[in-house]
Image (cartoon, grey):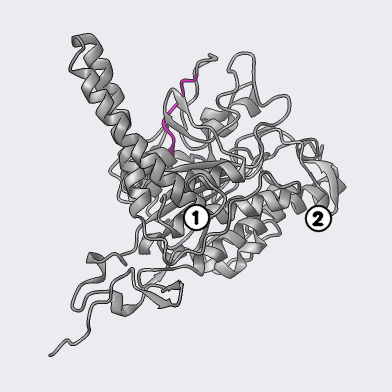
């Protein structure tokens, strides 16, 4: 057998007078007789954790049929096109969220399943997204990204005993380090692609930053030679931080964005909430496509959100509406809000499905958890939690199934299962008791 295919550089462009047009990934860019897994085209796992506050109207979330080929109720209906890669899981509870403050600790315990300490100084548990980032996110400029739409919710998202740490984020890097959710699209864009509104401005500023970091490193090394042991140790810590920044800058400067069409930076926070949600989902997809990160967490609305949904004809603020008192009209409006959330999530899923990745698409290689850490918002309970998993998981997620586990099964079992499917070696997370073979 003769192999005559030539290897075309991944950075090849079409050149004209004064212009250059980037090419998408072509078969010719993969070296002949080279396994896909050994090339730059090899698929990489992506993980996303999409959180919505205030639970769900559970009879409009939970399918009636267990098993495959089930009908999707109103709130989940927008995910119908992706049902083959959808698993709805019923019967889950998160005991770590059960406490008097409710809203003040519900978000921050969703991915850790560890009850927080009563203190204004946070002490909870490392969250699922950050555990994943430690294993699949270290070879990207940003090991993870954390985004939201509102800086904080109304009264109740903080507590006099627990403070505000657990109510404003779903991500903890370690038990004592909550990660803020960036809600300004402009700041997020510049975090991902560099300061500057246009490609030309970003390139100029990136060059200046690289030069500055070189100067900082040299100056710090010179200083260290003139210091005593204690100060020298402090400078060592400083240099470690500088080296980490240099690593991220080098990865940013060498990343291949030839297949990504970058818009100019957003002007700021959109005046319309629906545009804000859509823009944040688009930025996560763009960051995945550019391989700037492989782990993302998103709070679609703040806990105790007072956001109205006038753009779908609902003027009620979200949190007051969630206290529906079983009023049929309020339940109908609340379900519409929650279905809209799912619709925006489905739009994001569709975007991932349209992005080539290896021999498939990005959705095929994604692990996406979509859900809330509250069930019936009127009762403030945490069982049964509305929970769904979307994506092919690199062939390790089954999809097209509604699973119902025994009463009050720990949601930590699902978290542990997702880590296992990602190839993360872990025997226990929070109050987990087993891994789900069926997922």
Q: Nearer the viewer, residue 425 or 149?
A: 149
Residue at the spot of label 1: 200
Q: Secondary structure at mark 2?
A: helix
Residue sitting at x 35%, y 77%: 26
Q: Where residue 360 sits in the image (x, y, percent)? A: 40, 71
Label 2 – label 1 distance at C-alpha = 39 Å
The answer to whether any part of residue 403 appears in the image is: no
Specify few, some or many for label 2: CA neighbours under 10 Å numbering under 14, 14-19, or 20 or more: few
Magenta stretch, main secondary structure, is loop
The numbered mark at residue 325 is none
* Above-or-below relation of 83 to 241: below
Look at the image and give the residue range highlighted in magenta: 122-128
Quarter of the picture containing the N terminus is bottom left
Q: Where residue 197 sits in the image (x, y, percent)? A: 57, 50
The answer to whether any part of residue 174 appears in the image is: yes
Residue at the spot of label 2: 312
Q: Is residue 14 left or right of residue 383?
A: left
Q: Secondary structure at mark 1?
A: helix
* Above-or-below relation of 395 to 201: below
Q: Is residue 439 left or right of residue 307?
A: left
Residue sitting at x 30%, y 23%: 238
Instruction: Tell me which corner region of the image, top left, top right, bottom left or bottom right, holds residue 46.
Output: bottom left
**Precedes in sequence: disc 2 or disc 1:** 1
Q: Where residue 300 sits in the image (x, y, percent)? A: 63, 45
User: Is residue 33 found inside the magenta-colored segment of the image?
Assistant: no
Residue sitting at x 65%, y 54%: 278
Q: Nearer the viewer, residue 324 or 195?
A: 195
* Above-or-below relation of 215 to 14: above
Specify few, some or many for label 1: CA neighbours under 10 Å numbering under 14, 14-19, or 20 or more: few
């Amino acid at each position: 057998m003769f192999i005559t295919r030539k290897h075309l550089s991944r950075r090849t462009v079409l050149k004209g007078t004064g212009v250059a047009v980037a090419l998408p990934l072509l078969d010719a860019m993969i070296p002949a007789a080279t396994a896909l897994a050994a090339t730059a085209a090899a698929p990489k796992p992506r993980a996303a954790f999409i959180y919505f506050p205030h639970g769900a109207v559970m009879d409009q979330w939970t399918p009636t049929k267990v098993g495959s080929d089930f009908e999707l109720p109103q709130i989940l209906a927008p995910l119908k096109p992706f049902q083959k890669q959808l698993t709805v899981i019923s019967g889950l509870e998160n005991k770590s969220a059960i406490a008097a403050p409710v809203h003040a600790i519900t978000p921050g315990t969703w991915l850790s399943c560890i009850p927080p300490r009563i203190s204004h100084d946070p002490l909870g548990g490392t969250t699922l997204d950050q555990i994943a980032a430690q294993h699949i996110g270290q070879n990207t400029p940003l090991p993870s990204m954390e985004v939201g739409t509102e800086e904080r919710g109304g009264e109740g998202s903080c507590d006099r005993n627990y403070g505000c740490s657990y109510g404003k984020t779903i991500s903890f890097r370690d038990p004592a380090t909550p990660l803020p959710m960036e809600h300004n699209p402009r700041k997020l864009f510049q975090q991902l692609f560099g300061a500057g509104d246009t490609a030309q401005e970003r390139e100029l500023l990136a060059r200046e930053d690289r030069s500055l970091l070189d100067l900082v490193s040299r100056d710090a090394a010179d200083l260290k030679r003139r210091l005593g042991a204690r100060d020298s140790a402090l400078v060592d810590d400083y240099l470690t931080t500088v080296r980490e920044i240099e690593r991220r800058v080098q990865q940013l400067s060498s990343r291949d964005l030839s297949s990504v069409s970058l818009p100019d930076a957003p002007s700021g926070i959109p005046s319309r909430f629906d545009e804000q949600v859509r823009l944040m989902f688009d930025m996560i997809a763009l960051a995945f496509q550019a391989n700037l990160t492989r782990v993302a967490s998103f709070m679609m609305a703040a806990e105790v959100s007072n956001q109205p949904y006038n753009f779908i004809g609902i003027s009620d603020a979200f949190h007051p509406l969630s206290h529906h008192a079983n009023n049929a009209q309020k339940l109908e409006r609340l379900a519409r809000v929650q279905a809209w959330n799912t619709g925006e999530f489905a739009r994001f899923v569709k975007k991932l499905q349209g992005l080539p990745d290896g021999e498939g698409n990005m959705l095929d290689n994604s692990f996406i958890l979509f859900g809330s850490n509250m069930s019936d918002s009127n009762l403030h309970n945490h069982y049964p939690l509305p929970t769904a998993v979307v994506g092919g998981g690199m062939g390790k997620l089954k999809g097209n199934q509604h699973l119902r586990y025994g009463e009050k099964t720990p949601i930590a079992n699902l978290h542990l299962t997702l880590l296992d499917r990602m190839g993360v070696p872990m025997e226990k997370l929070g109050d987990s008791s087993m891994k789900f073979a069926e997922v």
